[in-house]
């Protein structure tokens, strides 16, 4: 960093200190936004956090917020099932896509396929949800009614987190030095042997970081899941049962929630944010390790 | 081959079998190269090289940069297959087997013809895994067998005493010279007949370079070694044969090939004389 | 002496198997992508016309067009971008040009933005509802929706701009200081122009993100589908319109298809343009 030695390189003139003032003000606002969000979530959650013991989220008989019953477990379970299911599908598909781009496709094909994945990122979640609602749900309904189900949520989420996994795995694999691969081939190791033995272990941290980011995205995704999951508060017994996720629950009930109910929704929002923050923190650490 | 050979000189590599190996420099050709030409995108990079490389000897390839020495080396284990737009014509026989014959599988060939590169490149795995990965890939999966091979090759390259008690640490924690010896051990683990070395000492400091050079000398006899080097003094010290390449226009050519002594002391070509005496190149 | 076994038959079989699986995955993903696009086009193209874009919706959106919705979307975007860009870019300039990488304040800001980037959009919605709509008394309005989106855009705008500024070679800065330029002048005349393509790419990505957003607007900008009179009026964004048509309006599928087609085409154009601006290394940093 050259600027860190500013006093040697640049005499601090008036315009410069004015500019610095403006820049600092902007940065302070940027930093404050996160604080403000945390603050308001906590303030809005306070009525519940202060009065109702959080244990009730796990001990109440059911989720009937209008009657003051706040059993969150079925919703947490639905969130977890949908995210884990989507990850189980998206991880192999995403890594396969990245391997295809880096090691299997011709340069032309690789370019096109990568562009396709990048465009997949650009499709808004509401459109994924709409497509799931009009195409996937009727298809699943033919297989096993009602159609709007855990399975539909998993499939739509898979499509949404696949690009994240593919693109992070792609950049991690591209960062594997070509010498490793040349050495592996000179040892008579086959292409898959090289990928499995050398390239994937070398890119492990980057790929894991991508998977964790994708998990965070799956947990927080609202609209697409809201539109296809059926939103019944229950423990799903099969893939064809409807479920409700934490994020969808907030979207469904905030509009009419009052008092404690509203506070409970803010608590679940806080919970969701903390979960996602922990995940992206881990991903950040892994990234840092990779660059170190 | 047992590795616990008695050594009367304690601080040298325990490469016992060498002394008992085949007489050095039997005039048996291990690699026969006939009219080998290499084209990159239609441009000739190496022009009609014909040469025999003798079994158990060290053959040094010398010459200025860009004269096709490395290309020649990569043609022998068909690493040129990986370069898009690279076209190889002519014939190479490795132990009387045509390497471009459809029945010759590139991976089988590369198992017989090991290669060590300029930059030491251990994989970012543990020391043990570096050595066991290629073995697994070639169908050796029994743990005891792998451990025995690892011990043997580590002794061969003089790393056993240095690393035997920390085989599970990352190979990247080794010093540059140790890394390069590990790469040589990795190549040796596959029991190649031939070792190709592309400037194996040039990325190392003089001390480590000396250790690796000693090691190469000790491998003489057991392996046929082809080494590219820019260090003429080194070529002179270690090689039995030397091949001098020169570049005319864009195309590399083999100017002269012969016993090392002949190339360095009484070369028959004036370019060779100029190059080895430091006048050209 | 160990024997190296002849194993390549087994190896070839394994490699072929893996290759088959990889190609199959890629084909599957491409097929689904094309399936989605074809579905959207087939469902929406017949309904899409010039009238659809310039007429107000009738019969809760089953008939008519999306003109007021486009206007509301544009206004929300404008509020979001005009608020977020000055804050984000000043932050980025400070982080990239004025504070050392290990400066505590810079680290704190960067960390805060990193955390902000991970916050799910529905949580932004909750916050926007509590802070802008209720605490600041802006109600369900374009202004509170736009401001909520501005918070969401801060991290992406800042990180792309910072990455862009960092790709400007240091020689620019040293030669500017050698010429005795003030840092302000160097910034305005040399560094910002050099980083402009990346700044533009980041801006486009941010606009795309805002355009695609639904959950954060659910309880901030409101549902009203008529033409907004002012920024304090409620306005329905295009993405929200699609949601409402498909979930709450029976028989709203056809206009929802057409609206999706409009939204996806807009986003595709924006993203392709953004990719054009940011090449190579910068692109890798920004897109992933």
Image (tube, helix red, strand yellow):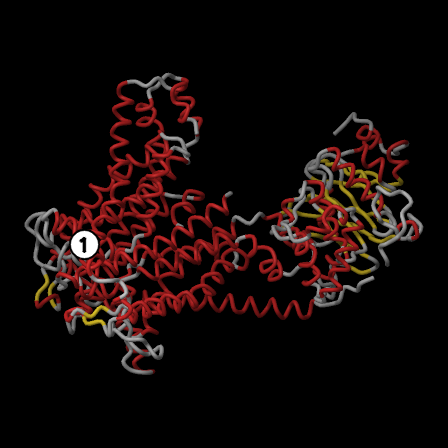
Q: Position of residue B99 (x, y in %)?
A: 75, 58
* Badge 1 element: helix
Observer-nearest of C203 and A26:
A26
Observer-nearest of C20 and B214:
B214
Relative horizontal placement of residue C174, taking residue B163 as reference (left or right) = left
Q: Quadrant of residue C256?
A: bottom left
Observer-nearest of B110 and B251:
B110
Relative horizontal placement of residue B266, taking residue B100 as reference (left or right) = right
Quadrant of the snapshot with the N terminus of chain B? bottom right
Q: Quadrant of residue C40?
A: bottom left
Relative horizontal placement of residue A70, taking residue B63 as reference (left or right) = left
Q: Residue at x 24, y 33 (%)?
A: A25
Whether residue C41 can be seen here: no
Relative horizontal placement of residue B26, taking residue A265 as reference (left or right) = right
Q: Residue at x 38, y 19 (%)?
A: A7
Q: Residue at x 32, y 70 (%)?
A: A78
Q: Position of residue C87 (x, y in %)?
A: 25, 38
Which residue corresponds to mark 1?
A44
Quadrant of the snapshot with the C terminus of chain B? top right
Q: Position of residue B253 (x, y in %)?
A: 76, 40
Q: Chain of mark 1?
A: A
Q: Quadrant of residue C6?
A: bottom right
Observer-nearest of A27 and B35:
A27
* B95 is higher (above) or lower (below) than A23: below
Q: Position of residue B15 (x, y in %)?
A: 85, 49
* Total residue callouts: 1
Whether residue A54 can be seen here: yes
Within 10 Å of disc 1 (Cα), the crowding (few <14, some 14-19, many 20+) is many
């Amino acid at each position: 960093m050259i600027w860190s030695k500013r006093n040697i390189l640049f005499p601090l003139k008036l315009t410069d200190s004015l500019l610095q003032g403006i820049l600092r003000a902007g940065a302070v606002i940027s930093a404050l936004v996160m604080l403000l969000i945390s603050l308001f979530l906590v303030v809005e959650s306070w009525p519940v956090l202060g009065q109702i013991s959080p244990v009730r989220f796990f001990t109440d008989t059911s989720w009937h917020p209008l009657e003051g019953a706040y059993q969150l477990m079925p919703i947490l379970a639905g969130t977890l099932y949908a995210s884990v299911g989507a990850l189980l599908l998206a991880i192999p598909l995403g890594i396969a896509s990245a391997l295809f781009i880096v090691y299997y496709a011709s340069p032309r094909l690789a370019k096109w396929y990568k562009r396709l994945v990048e465009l997949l990122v650009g499709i808004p979640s509401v459109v994924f949800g709409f497509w799931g609602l009009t195409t996937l749900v009727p298809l699943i309904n033919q297989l096993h009614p009602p159609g709007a189900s855990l399975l539909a949520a998993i499939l739509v989420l898979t499509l949404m987190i696949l690009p994240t996994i593919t693109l992070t795995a792609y950049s991690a694999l591209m960062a594997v030095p070509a010498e490793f691969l040349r050495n592996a081939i000179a040892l008579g190791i086959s292409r898959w042997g090289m990928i499995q033995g050398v390239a994937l272990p070398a890119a492990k941290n980057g790929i894991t970081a991508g998977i964790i980011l994708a998990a965070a995205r799956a947990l927080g995704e609202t609209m697409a899941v809201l539109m296809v999951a059926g939103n019944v508060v229950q423990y799903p017994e099969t893939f064809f049962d409807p479920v409700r996720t934490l994020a969808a629950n907030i979207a469904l009930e905030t509009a009419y929630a009052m008092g404690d109910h509203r506070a409970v929704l803010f608590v679940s929002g806080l919970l969701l944010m903390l979960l996602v923050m922990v995940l992206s923190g881990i991903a950040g650490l892994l990234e840092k390790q990779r660059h170190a | 081959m047992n590795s616990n050979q008695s050594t009367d000189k304690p601080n040298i590599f325990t490469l016992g079998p060498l002394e008992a190996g085949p007489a050095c420099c039997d005039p048996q050709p291990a690699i026969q190269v006939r009219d080998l030409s290499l084209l990159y995108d239609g441009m000739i990079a190496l022009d009609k090289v014909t040469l025999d490389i003798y079994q158990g000897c060290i053959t040094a390839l010398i010459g200025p940069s860009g004269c096709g020495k490395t290309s020649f080396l990569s043609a022998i284990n068909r690493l040129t297959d990986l370069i898009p737009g690279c076209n190889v014509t002519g014939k190479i026989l490795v132990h009387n087997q045509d390497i471009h014959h459809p029945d010759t599988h590139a991976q089988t060939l590369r198992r017989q013809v090991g290669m060590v590169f300029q930059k030491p490149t251990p994989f970012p795995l543990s020391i043990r895994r570096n050595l066991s990965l290629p073995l697994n890939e070639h169908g050796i999966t029994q743990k005891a067998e792998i451990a025995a091979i690892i011990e043997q090759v580590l002794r061969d390259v003089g790393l056993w005493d240095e690393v035997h008690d920390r085989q599970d640490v990352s190979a990247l924690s080794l010093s540059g010279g140790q890394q390069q010896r590990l790469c040589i051990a990795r190549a040796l683990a596959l029991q190649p007949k031939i070792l190709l070395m592309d400037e194996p000492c040039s990325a190392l400091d003089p001390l480590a370079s000396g250790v690796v050079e000693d090691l190469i000398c000790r491998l003489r006899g057991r392996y046929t070694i082809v080494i590219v080097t820019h260090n003429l003094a080194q070529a002179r010290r270690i090689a039995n044969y030397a091949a001098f390449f020169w570049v005319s226009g864009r195309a590399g050519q083999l100017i002269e090939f012969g016993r090392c002594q002949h190339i360095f002391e009484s070369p028959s070509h004036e370019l060779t004389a100029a190059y080895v005496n430091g006048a050209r190149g | 002496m160990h024997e190296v076994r002849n194993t390549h038959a087994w190896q070839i079989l394994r490699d072929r198997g893996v290759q088959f699986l990889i190609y199959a995955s890629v084909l599957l993903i491409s097929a689904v992508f094309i399936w989605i696009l074809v579905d959207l086009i087939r469902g929406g193209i017949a309904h899409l016309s010039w009238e659809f874009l310039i007429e107000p919706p009738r019969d809760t959106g089953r008939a008519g067009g999306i003109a007021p919705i486009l206007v509301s979307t544009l206004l929300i975007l404008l509020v979001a971008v005009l608020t977020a860009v000055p804050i984000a870019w000043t932050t980025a300039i400070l982080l990239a040009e004025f504070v050392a990488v290990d400066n505590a304040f810079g680290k704190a800001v960067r960390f805060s933005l990193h955390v902000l980037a991970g916050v799910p959009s529905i949580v932004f919605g909750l916050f926007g509802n509590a802070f802008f709509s209720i605490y600041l008394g802006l109600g369900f309005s374009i202004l509170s929706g736009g401001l909520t989106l501005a918070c969401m855009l801060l991290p992406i705008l800042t990180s792309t701009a910072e990455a862009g500024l960092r790709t400007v070679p240091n020689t620019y800065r040293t030669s500017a200081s050698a010429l005795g330029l003030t840092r302000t002048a160097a910034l305005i005349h040399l560094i910002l122009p050099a980083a402009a393509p990346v700044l533009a790419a980041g801006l486009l990505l941010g606009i795309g993100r805002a355009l695609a957003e639904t959950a954060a607007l659910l309880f901030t900008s409101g549902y009203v589908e008529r033409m907004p009179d002012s920024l304090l009026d409620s306005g329905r964004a295009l993405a929200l319109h699609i949601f409402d048509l498909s979930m709450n309006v029976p028989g709203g599928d056809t206009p929802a298809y057409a609206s999706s087609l409009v939204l996806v085409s807009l986003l595709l154009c924006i993203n392709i343009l953004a990719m054009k601006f940011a090449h190579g290394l910068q692109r890798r940093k920004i897109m992933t």
